[in-house]
Image: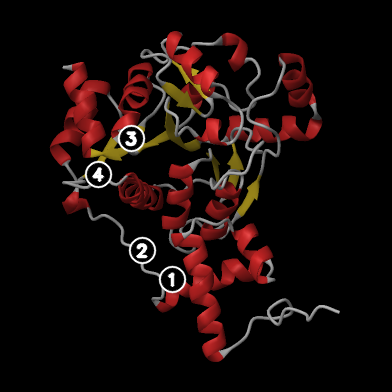
Amino acid sequence: MAERNPYSARLPVNEQRDHLMVQVAKLYYDLDRTQSDIAKELGLTRWQVGRLLTEAKESGVVKIEITPRAGRRTSLEVELQRYFGVREAIVVPTGDIETPSLIIDSVAQAAAAHLVSLNPKPALMGVSWGRTMAAVARALPKDWCPGLHVVLVNGSTALTTTTSRNSAVAEEFAQSAGGSATLLPVPAIMGSRTTRDALERDPIIERVLRLAEEAPVVCFGLGGLTHQSVLLGSGYLDENDIGRLRALNAVGDIMGRFVDQQGRITDRQLDERTIGLRLHALAKKERVIGVAAGEDKHMITAACLRAGYITDLVTDEGTARRILEETA
């Protein structure tokens, strides 16, 4: 008979607990494992994993640095706000940094600081998923918006194994805030429009989509049309789809919806198979926060700005400069 894992009943104390805390933090922050994966691997509950991560922050085992306002590229922010009319632009300096993961983390920290600073604090917020949004979730401090209800705004169930946290992003936003999450446990893209229509008519799915419509604040990551796309990695698209979308002048996706340089849907048939918030619904929101990290995102970010989909932009200085250079 297999020996019972000593951590499955209750968390240990003393040095054994410290060791476990470091192990959990390393898996989560350095190896990009989900809380569910860590719980299964270590024989813990997800609640215990979350508790250890919180303790790791509070005790100084994990230190998350938020980019200070003085370190921002305010001249680029002003240009973006003047040219595109956005309410707020936050541009993070990157200097000589070229490592994509470091750029994502820097932008994510700035996005987390921006969310914390929202006034008034929202009671309901919609979020998307993906690498950038997972990084934002990791950077949020404890109890930043007590009672917040977080809703996932687009389908998230992956078809293949992926390191992206997908639906877990909404859960982690809610956990850090001290609130609750409503998920959208369906694929991002279906095989046919009739299947998508049938799913969206289901009372449970319909209720989630209605919550997404009602959310006054939405935050999402912008997806470039590259071979690193999370939709490609999650099994929804293949290399042929990427080539076809490029031929249709797509520059990237917004919540899984592929658009051209003006923010117009490029592939109607694909869009009709996509589950989630429609782009026209963004015009009704009080705040729409787009987060873009890396120069491969400059075209989709510019498209989002031209179409007026976002009120707030958080990005890095390389992306900001490319946008402004190409729109001058």
Question: Gap in Å between the C-alphas at discs 4 and 3?
Answer: 21 Å
- What is the total number of numbered labels drawn onto the structure image? 4
- Check contact, mark 4 vs mark 1: CB within 8 A: no
- Check contact, mark 2 vs mark 1: CB within 8 A: yes
Q: Nearer the viewer, residue 280 or 40?
A: 40
Question: Gap in Å between the C-alphas at discs 2 and 4?
Answer: 20 Å
Residue shown at the point (62%, 10%) measured from the top left: 269
Between disc 4 and disc 3, the foreground one is 4
Amino acid at pointer 3 = Leu
Q: What colour scheme governs how the chains and residues are painted in the rendered image of this protein?
A: secondary structure
Q: From the viewer's perspective, is residue 283 above or below residue 175?
A: above
| For marks 4 and 1 on the same chain, the one whose residue lies earlier in the sequence | 1
| For marks 2 and 1 on the same chain, the one whose residue lies earlier in the sequence | 1
| Dot label at residue 98 | 4
- Check contact, mark 3 vs mark 2: CB within 8 A: no
| For marks 3 and 1 on the same chain, the one whose residue lies earlier in the sequence | 1
* Residue 299 horizontal side relative to residue 200, left or right: left
Residue 2 point in image, percent of width and height: 81, 78
List the residue tagged with mark 1.
57
Local SS, label 2 = loop
* Residue 324 horizontal side relative to residue 254, left or right: left
Q: From the viewer's perspective, is residue 33 above or below residue 217?
A: below
| For marks 2 and 4 on the same chain, the one whose residue lies earlier in the sequence | 2
Amino acid at pointer 1 = Lys
Amino acid at pointer 2 = Ile
List the residue tagged with mark 2.
64
Q: On the rendered image, what quadrant is the N terminus found in?
A: bottom right
Residue shown at the point (29%, 47%) measured from the top left: 99
List the residue tagged with mark 3.
313
Amino acid at pointer 4 = Glu
